[in-house]
Image (cartoon, rainbow, N blue to C red):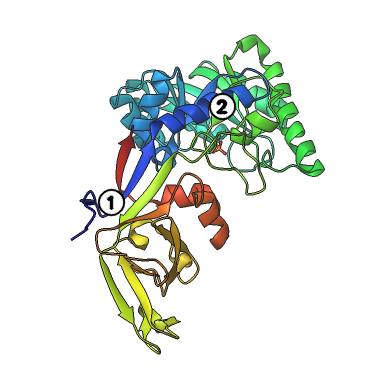
Amino acid sequence: MGMTMKKPNIRRSWVEVNLDILAENLRIYRQSMQGDHPIMAVVKANAYGHGDLAVAGRLQSEGVRDFAVSNLAEAIRLRQGGIAGQILILGYTPVELAKDLLEYDITQAILDEDYAAALAATGVKTKAQFAIDTGMNRIGLDALEPGDCERTIRKYSGAFALTGLFTHLCVADTDDTDCRVFTALQQALVRAGAERVGDLHLPFVHCLNSAGGLWHGQADGLVRLGIILYGLKPDYANDLPAGIRPALEWKTVVSMVKTVHPGETVGYGRTYRADADRVIATLPTGYADGYNRLLSNCGQVLINGQSAPIIGRVCMDQMMVDVTGIDGVRPGDEVTLLNHDTYTADDMAETIGTIGYEIVCDISARVERVYLP
Ligand SMILES: *Cc1c(COP(=O)(O)O)cnc(C)c1O
């Protein structure tokens, strides 16, 4: 019958993470950064949706020794999964759980003086690093009050096993004069703070995120590398070093194909109306998989390398696309939702006015992660 045999798809909606691309991104980033900084891999939020254990495990075998997460559960997962180096929690941990910090050898960020006092009161001498607020106004001791900062750090330097200070840059990804000046100010503030307590010989004083390490890397200290490791941009306007590309692809399959006739509508709210015979394919991926509903009637997917627009509203578990111009689309055919180059999480993000970070972090737990090679 001249039928070509395709490999059957036994999956519904899945992410393929290419760990070689991840390792290559790390290698290119190291070559491209200003200065020779150690890398702390930021693997919070399930490694930005890529799978924290697989990602951290591969990075550990590439020589990375320092990791950062957002919370205690993420930290314990890494430790139990065989990650041996430093694991820093960048955000809040209830002090009632301080014993776990010690048991799993986790380093806790100290958010402010009240948090320092509460954690010290537990009597658990956990590893810790003070967050210093240099302008983000999120967490940290206020760097604009250097005397208070110094006093607080000294007061608690014996209560914890204090290993460092860090701040977070808020405009390192933006290349205009105001932002460059502000970033330089943030770096100067943390440096000045560290100098005031220089006698404590804190081994980790750091401020650089992905963007900072590439474009503001004159400062010392390790780079907390997140988004660029995964091959995405801190900001749309950024150009990444050549060769860095998204490590994941997101795929689904065609579950059904049908023709709708002029005047018929598709989906909830009847927001799409056919003006001619249209061939539509149904896909078993929806917003419960993390496929953003704002892509209704404006997103696209790729089938056989061709673009198929989303028609109607994205449903919880399914969506419909127009495949009228694409020959021979059949149930079981593979569909690409995100790929390494022509339609990335950054491209999808731009359509709906968000950032690639949110697109990949949102891919939900029920989407299977498959690791290549
Ligand atoms: C998430 C985070 C990072 C990583 O930022 P990227 O822009 O993804 O590189 C670094 N530092 C802190 C404190 C963070 O919260």
Q: Quadrant of residue 43?
A: top left
Nearer the observer, 8 or 316: 8
Q: Nearer the viewer, mark 1 or mark 2?
A: 2
Q: Is residue 325 visible?
A: yes
Q: Is residue 124 visible?
A: no
State the residue at coordinates (31%, 42%).
369
State the residue at coordinates (27%, 64%).
330
Residue 125 screen position, x and y as percent: 42, 19
- For label 2, the residue is 28
Tell me how far mark 1 sits from mark 2, CA to CA. 32 Å
Element on which disc 2 rests: helix
State the residue at coordinates (29%, 26%).
81
Above or below for 102 versus 331: above
> Looking at numbered disc 1 in the image, what kind of residue is underneath it?
Arg
The reply to whether callout 1 and callout 2 are in contact (CB within 8 Å) is no
Q: Quadrant of residue 146?
A: top right
> Looking at numbered disc 2 in the image, what kind of residue is underneath it?
Ile
Q: Is residue 86 left or right of residue 176?
A: left
Q: Is residue 171 left or right of residue 96?
A: right
Mark closer to the chain start, 1 or 2: 2
Looking at the figure, which quarter contains the N terminus? bottom left
- For label 1, the residue is 366
Q: Quadrant of residue 335?
A: bottom left
Q: Is residue 175 left or right of residue 234?
A: right
Residue 186 screen position, x and y as percent: 72, 33
Above or below for 262 versus 46: below
Looking at the figure, which quarter contains the C terminus? top left
Nearer the observer, 7 or 249: 7
Above or below for 141 versus 198: below
- Label 2 crowding class (10 Å Cα cut-off): few <14, some 14-19, many 20+? some
State the residue at coordinates (57%, 34%).
112
